[in-house]
Amino acid sequence: RDGAVAHVDFGIMLNVRYAKDLVETKIKLSHEFVQVIGQDLSELERLCAEGFLAVRRHAPQLLALLRTAALAGTAGLPCLEGDAVEQVQRRLVLEKAEAEARQHMLTQLGKARENMRTELLDLIHDFTHANV
């Protein structure tokens, strides 16, 4: 319930500044998460690919919503500053056919699995939130 095991980190997805340059992939599969779900990630991969393709199908609406929120100067959402909307659009690889986009997502999952940079980001996150 508290997102300790699994959650969508919209800050990373939408480009929060402290994570932007540190994390090359916008997906995180921590060692702990892999331990919980097990080494066979085929079901997770299938679901992530399906979810990614579903989001792509609604990309015009999603991007319009994000642009509107960014233009409105939504206070307290640094993830919508700068080029965040364009970054999301690039991550959706809209120029690719569906099969290529599916493969792109699977490749991103592979890169994300127990990535050392995301482990470092966890340490930074824990430190900054512990001192707030």
Image: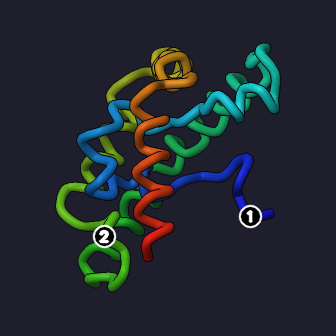
Relative height, residue 11 to residue 19 (above, below): below
Task: Indicate the secondary structure of the residue bearing disc 2.
Answer: helix
Give the quadrant of residue 26.
top left
Task: Indicate the secondary structure of the residue bearing disc 1.
Answer: loop
Q: Quadrant where the N terminus lies?
A: bottom right
Q: Position of residue 126 (x, y in %)?
A: 50, 56
User: Which residue is depicted at the point 45% across and 36% down?
Assistant: 118
Q: Position of residue 21 (x, y in %)?
A: 24, 41
Position of residue 117 in the picture relative to residue 122 (left or right): left
Under mark 1, the amino acid is: Asp
User: Which residue is depicted at the point 77% across and 26% down?
Assistant: 35
Q: Position of residue 12 (x, y in %)?
A: 42, 50
**Residue 16 versus residue 46: which sits nearer the camera?**
16
Residue 79 shows which numbered tag? none
User: Which residue is depicted at the point 44% across and 26% down?
Assistant: 116
Residue labelled with disc 2: 78
Q: Position of residue 50 (x, y in %)?
A: 67, 32
Q: Quadrant where the C terminus lies?
A: bottom left
Residue labelled with disc 1: 2
**Residue 130 versus residue 63: which sits nearer the camera?**
130
